Image: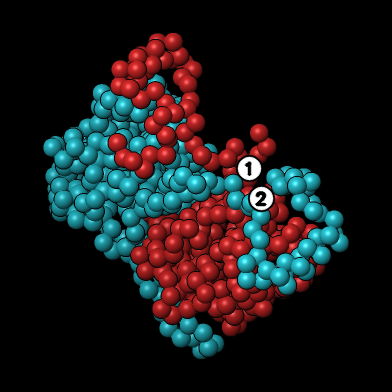
Chain colours: A red, B cyan
Amino acid sequence: MKSESVFQRDRYPTGLMLGLGMYAMMSVACAEHPPQPPFSALPQSRLVDLTHPFGSETIVWPTEQDIKVIVQHAEDMPGGYYYASNRLELPEHGGTHMDAPIHFARGTQTLDQIPIDRLVGGAVRIDVADQCANDRDYRVEIRDLERWESRHGRIPVHAIVLLDTGFGRLWPARQQYLGTELRGAEGVDALHFPGLHPDAAVWLVRERQVKAVGIDTASIDYGRSTKFETHVALLSHNVPVFENLADLSGLPNHGFDVIALPMKIAGGTGGPLRIIAIVPEPR
Amino acid sequence: MKSESVFQRDRYPTGLMLGLGMYAMMSVACAEHPPQPPFSALPQSRLVDLTHPFGSETIVWPTEQDIKVIVQHAEDMPGGYYYASNRLELPEHGGTHMDAPIHFARGTQTLDQIPIDRLVGGAVRIDVADQCANDRDYRVEIRDLERWESRHGRIPVHAIVLLDTGFGRLWPARQQYLGTELRGAEGVDALHFPGLHPDAAVWLVRERQVKAVGIDTASIDYGRSTKFETHVALLSHNVPVFENLADLSGLPNHGFDVIALPMKIAGGTGGPLRIIAIVPEPR
């Protein structure tokens, strides 16, 4: 018995004979409705998946190849069982993914080195959908963050900040989402989508010590960027970035937790991300 | 303001002027130690990563190709910034991964279709390391589960069950972990590692309605299996399987939560999994 068990021993009948007796009784009397000890510490909650599916339709950067899911098996096997499996080929930075610090900051953390503590915790949603609907080259500014705080209170230190530009709802329509269907360098030149202004990124890092920043567009820098200053501002301070998040409009403005778990690629500069929100429901 | 916000409006001063006044005061007086409203509903906890890193050393099934992480960029760019990125090639079922029901059960859920509710929640660890140290072809039996219950209480319905065979600590030594370094069909014939007996799988599904089952070996069926009956028993009932989990010995026997988030592959038969445990710490 490990001492780190969080169930206090004295809260349950733990004498072996008593335990066996209880178990035998429960097995007979309650086989269909067994008792449930309080075994989860998570709040009563609604889980919200903030992840786009990965496949050949997944939007990738104009210079990247599309994701391939290559079927190996989907058939009855000689052993008498059905068996299905695939292989995958993909860029680290396509679809809903995380940028590791090393993506834009030499010598910093790779994807597998990011402490998971940074990727789990209380989060806020900054709704800038109106601004971005009016201007698809919009950059979220410090005044947008201050306006949010004037309504909802100060962004707590060590929050995960999600920027809701409304563009997550345009996925997977490439023209609407990226502003272009062109590929290659020509496609990069034609990108038009909102992002986070570098000054606001510095503010979030310095003034609010954010854990991580996410956005529902293809890049935390807006589509017109050529120097990727917002990436540098965040990643050089070990603040990971989540990109191509799914529709965020189902989230409250605050009072929820985010769990953002990337594929643990050794030496990864980024990679596929599964990200969910845990939104407590009133009991 | 969305009505689904879980912070009750009357718990905080929300008048705009009052809010602005508070904010101004906090900015001046508490710039270095801003107040932290209770913005996370997660318990005070220790996060434990149960995931092996992915890379060329990752153990894959003997018939699979090794994982490739192909460097695209790791250099200063003409725009004046550093940039690094990779491409990935991998099987769905290598390293720490999840099996979706469709992997062995025709017409059932693909990886992206598994409800996330199944992948999040209270968990138990069944320690069978002694049995597996004595017999590397050991299969966890119903009596092992009953023995656990006689010590720790009944496995709650809808638990996530993790089988700690001790083999997670042998990773990444292929010979010790799989029982062979051979590849191809010859390698499959030489596999020796523990798994879950099909009868015990049926018991977990029928008698305890488990959400999911995980193991720290390369397969939920033991290495000698040729018919994969444990896979079929679990997956045909939409119980997902986690394989190649990392060392589980740091977990308590119960009283912790698991968050298991796979890459959301459209039509995936399985895929890379990032899995963590949330172990509440006494306050």
Q: Residue A122 at what x, y percent from top left?
A: 60, 54
Q: From the viewer's perspective, tell me whether residue B29 is left or right of residue A15.
A: right
The reply to whether discs 1 and 2 touch (Cβ–Cβ < 8 Å) is yes
Q: Is residue B108 in sight in this rendering?
A: no
x 16%, y 40%: residue: B133
Horizontal side of residue B185 vs B127, given as left or right:
left
Q: Residue at x 70, y 50 (%)?
A: A252
Q: Residues within 10 Å of mark 2 (few under 14, many from 20)?
A: many
Most foreground residue, B90 or A238: A238
Q: Which residue does the image show at 86% across and 61% down from the upper left?
A: B17
| Residue at the extreme top | A29
Q: Quadrant of residue A3?
A: top left
Q: Quadrant of residue B154?
A: top left
Q: What residue do we see at 47% from left, 33% from top?
A: A39
Query: In the rendered structure, which amino acid carries the disc numbered 1?
Result: Pro
Percent coordinates x, y for residue B166 in the rendering = 23, 44
Give the label on residue B127, or none: none
Q: Name the chain letter of the residue that bears numbered label 1.
A: A
Judge whether residue A159 can be spotted in this image. yes
Question: Which mark is on residue A255?
Answer: 2
Please rate how many residues cluster around mark 1, counting C-alpha atoms within 10 Å: few if below 14, some from 14 to 19, many from 20. many
- Determine the CA span between mark 1 and mark 2: 8 Å
> Observer-nearest residue: B17 or B4?
B17
From the image, tell me which residue sits under label 1: A280
Q: Position of residue B95 (x, y in %)?
A: 32, 53
- Compared with residue B41, is residue B253 higher up or lower down, i.e. above or below? above
